[in-house]
Amino acid sequence: VVVQSGAILLFRLAQSKGAYAFSPASAVALTELVKLTLAMSSHWIEVQRSGSELLPPLSLSIVGNYFTLSCLYTFNNILTFFVLQQADPGTLSLFKSIAPYLCAIILRATGQKLNRLQWCCVLIQCCAIAIVQYDVVKGVPMLPSRAYFLLSLATCITAVSSVWNQKVIKGFDVPLNLQNVLLYGFGLLTSVGCYFFGPAKSTKGFLEGYGPLAWGLVLFQALHGLAVSLVYKHADAIVKNFANSSVMAVLVCVSAIWFDLRMNLHSALAVIIIVITTYVYMAIAIKMKEVEERREPALAGENQALMGKGIDEDEESSEGGDEELALPGGARREQAIQGAALNDDDPPGFRACVSSTCRRWCDSARA
């Protein structure tokens, strides 16, 4: 939260009369170079400490994933420079707060479950963002359509790359620092290519126009990239994007004071809703999910034990010579169910069996 707040502010403060004195593509390349240096140093220290292999075998799959991710990140990082020429930092962070909803949809499609409170938090957050971005007096959005297009594109890329990066980090048995080396190495190559050949090609020299604010931006962006990798490793993409809401709370206040962001009562209340929703998600919803995940195996084991006990008792009864209970298990249950009657204290539709054998199966189902 700290480094991202600083980085987004420096994106805006590094501008002079609505333009950058340096090349955005070279800034991205320098950021990737700093991140690559830090990741290589961390990997070397970890290898020396643990005695593990310096360069374990890498599959073509992980290399391809990180090359594609580096292209997405490079494009998104360069896009951020142009977005912040159209919008203030607070608006950018507000709009990117919709990314948790997109991440939730993508994660659900890839098999990760969310509980109902998590979904409610995500939807409330999206509604609050829409409130902030609509001028009720004029009946129009607060920014031009081109700005919203760039913001939407940046948000979609953020969501897709976040989930993709999380899946790659958790899906491959490769040290995190070595994965970062791959990502930042490809990022350096793609950003240098954009500087010389891509749409962000500039006539400025590679190091031309860099002052304290520009170098500060490079450093904060590099630290942010390393922090995000740890969040993906130990949490998930939704947590990372919900953390943007804390950044939003800081930057909206800063934008209202320094960058002429128009604030009124309903937009201020929407910001409060976003902050509260973030707290509910981080402090309550995630813990509920953890509790549910811990309970599921225990409940499954208990049910299996109860069912096994019922089967054992059925087998013991069959040894007593009861012709009805001597039938195969499936036939005994079917015959008992056919003679079942409803009990007054049972839920509607729940069949209370006359047969003691089927009664035991129903008790196991209740448990």
Image: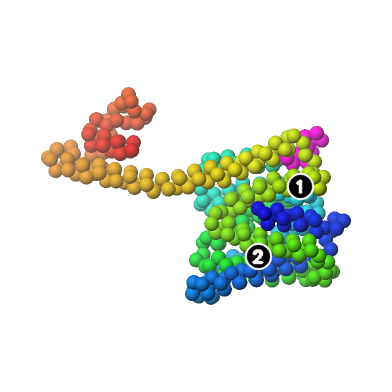
Residue 347: quarter of image: top left
Residue 42 pos. (x, y %): 59, 69
Residue 116 in the image: x percent, y percent?
53, 40
Q: Is residue 63 among the parts visible in the rendering?
A: no
Q: In this view, does 77 lie to the left or right of 111?
A: right
Query: Residue 366 occupies which quadrant of the picture?
Result: top left
Q: Where does residue 244 sit, x and y in percent of width and height?
A: 66, 50
User: Which quarter shows the C terminus?
Assistant: top left
Secondary structure of the residue carrying tag 1 is helix
Residue at x 33%, y 25% (from the top left corner):
345
Residue type at mark 2 is Ser
Whether residue 231 is visible: yes
**Residue at image point 83% right, 61% down:** 20
Viewer-closest of 48 and 110: 48
Element at badge 2? helix
Q: Is residue 137 magenta?
A: yes
Residue drawn at x 32%, y 31% is 351
**Left or right: where does residue 131 sit relative to residue 55?**
right
**Residue highlighted by disc 2:** 70
Question: What are the residue bounds of the magenta stretch?
Answer: 131-144
The circle drawn on residue 254 is 1
Amino acid carrying label 1: it is Val
Q: Tag 2 or tag 1, which sits nearer the N-term? A: 2
Image check: 156 left or right of 312?
right
Q: Which of 106 and 223 is in front in this view?
A: 223
